[in-house]
Structures are given as structure tokens and as C-alpha cells.
Image (spheres, rainbow, N blue to C red):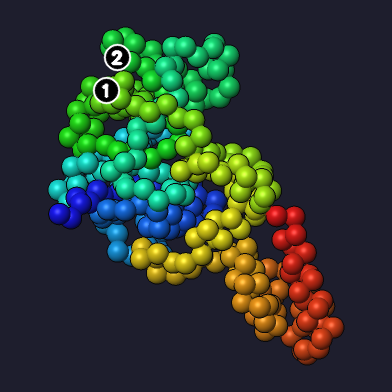
Amino acid sequence: MKAKTIDVVYVIGNGSRWKDNELRFSLRSITKNLSNIGKIFIVGQCPDYLKNITHIQACDIFDPAINADGNIITKILAACEDKRLSETFLFINDDHLVIKPMNIADVPPFHKGRMDTYPEEYWRLNYWRERLQLTKDVLLAKNLPCFHFDCHTPILMNKHQFKKVATDFDYKTGTGLTMKSIYGNSVWANQGLYLTDQKKTIFKNYKFQEIKERILPAQFLSFNDQGLNDSLKWWLIEQFPNKCKYESTNPQDRIFDIFFWMKNGMPYSEGVTIFKKYFKHKNLIEMFENRETEALKTKLKYKIQQSVKEL
């Protein structure tokens, strides 16, 4: 009997600093590594390179700087109201990747332990942790467990249960509440899986080899803007070089162009095009355009390869 498929929901805002290529590579990762995927739902902004997806238009109704989770919850609710969405769905962020093969139905509800055991200094790091602390206090006040489910991993949800959870918690007032922890503690409770090496984060600058070593044991990877350097881009392209069925075009990006130029044997004319597009040396551009000699071929290769030598 054919396994039942599970739809996937992405909530997209307008804050991408990489032209929504984060989403592109997340889609490539789940296409490659998750089996039994159903439809892809994009809620919110819809990048123009997408195809074969279901788009639900939704705007942010809360100030993202104050209550980002409130916007996520309202967008997921919009998806839950759509009759086309499977009862169970996978919620995943655009900066989350699945990097080892698995069945979509087997994605665990990860958590990072009970929040009431965390030291007091944990809550002082940043604004988001203040929201998480408020979530912990609300959960305890409701006599619910207080596991930390907001750990940068995908999570399976039931659309009927999600709607009920959203009505049981005041996520609209002030800074709001963290979405995965109110859902996880309401639905999964003690069934969650403690997160260890199943997921790795790239939240700061790593070199290419460091990234490869860091993620070796992981099934999942998440990153942020601080971690999205040329080394991570190169790793992403190396792991997921081909368009998936949800893309109509390839990314326009210096690292992407250089990667495939090098893989294709570094043809001179393509190298000149890359140099004109991404480099500002007018004299060299003129030299490369006007003639092709062995010396200029060597110089062109050296200049372009030097720009990625620190990966």
C-alpha cells in the first residue's frame, strides 16, 4: 500500500538578505532527503522563482520586531483553514535543511529539555529569549509541561490541534509567545525527543572544512544571516547543485556562478562573463574581453579563484 503523503508548510516574510535563496536550498534538501512529501504550501511572500507550489497570501499583522511569532502563528492558521492542506503537515523554516534521507512521517518533535531547569542567566541573552521565558511562565501557569521545542528544527503538526492551541493561548498581546513551545507542550508533552547531535547550527562564520566536520553526525541543519557566508553558500551548492521541481530558475549569485564555472572546466568566455558581472577592474575587463591568450587565461583563473580561496 502506498504511504500517505504529508504536506509541507513554509511561512515566508520579506526579510531575506539572500533573495530568498534560503528557501530554494531548503526545498532542494527536502526534495532530496524526505520521502512521502505531499504538496508544498508557501504562506506569505512568494518568491518569483517558485513553481508547482500552493501559495496562500498572508501579511504580517504584528510588528516583526516585537511579535514575530504572532505573525508565524497567524500564517499557519491561514494554512490550517485551507481544505487542501493535509491534516498532518510539516512546518519548516526556510533556513532549515534536511541533510540525511528519512521519511517525512518520522521527523521527531525535538526539544531541548525543560525550561524551568534553565539557569537564570540563560534568559538574559536577547529579546527572543525573553519571549521564550514568558512562554515558559504561561505554560507553567496552565499546569502544562515546559519543554523547549523552539530549537530550529522542523516539526510535524495537526491542523485541527494547531487551531485549538492558538485559541488556548494569548499570542497576540505584547511580545507574544513562542509558537513551537506552546504547540509542543500542548500536543507532544512528554513524547518529544531530546535534541543532541541530530541537528547542527551555523550561526557564525565557519570555513568550508569546519562546516563539513561540524555537521557530520546531523540529520538537520539550520543557519542564520551571521552564518550565511561564502563557505556555507559553497557547501549548499555542492550538496544541492540542481534545481528541484519547485524552481523555475537557478539563483543569481557569485558563488553559484563560480562553482559551476570551475566544475565545467573554467572556460575562458564564461570566466570573462563572471569577471564582468562581479568584479570592478575595468582595465582587466577590457583586456579579457579583447583577446584570449594563455597568459590571460591563467590570469583570469587566478583572479576568480583568489576570490574564493578563503572558503
Element under disc 2: loop
Q: Is residue 147 above or below residue 94?
A: above
Q: Observer-nearest residue: 43 or 197?
A: 197
Q: Is residue 262 above or below residue 207?
A: below
Q: Which residue reaches farthest right?
A: 295
Q: Mark 2 Cα within 10 Å, few/some/many (few <14, many 20+)?
A: some
The quadrant in which the N terminus is found is bottom left
In the image, what residue type sits under mark 1?
A: Ser
Q: Which mark is residue 246?
A: none
How far across and down, in percent of the image, does residue 161 sit?
20, 31
Q: Quadrant of residue 257?
A: bottom right
Element under disc 1: helix
* 295 displayed left or right of 200: right
In the image, what residue type sits under mark 2?
A: Leu
Q: Residue at x 62, y 63 (%)?
A: 255
Q: CA distance from mark 1 to mark 2?
A: 7 Å
Q: Which residue is mark 1?
A: 186
Q: Residue at x 66, y 45 (%)?
A: 210
Q: Is residue 192 above or below residue 291?
A: above
Q: Which residue is mark 2?
A: 144
Marks 1 and 2 close (CB-CB < 8 Å) = yes
Q: Residue at x 51, y 34 (%)?
A: 197
Q: Residue at x 40, y 51 (%)?
A: 101
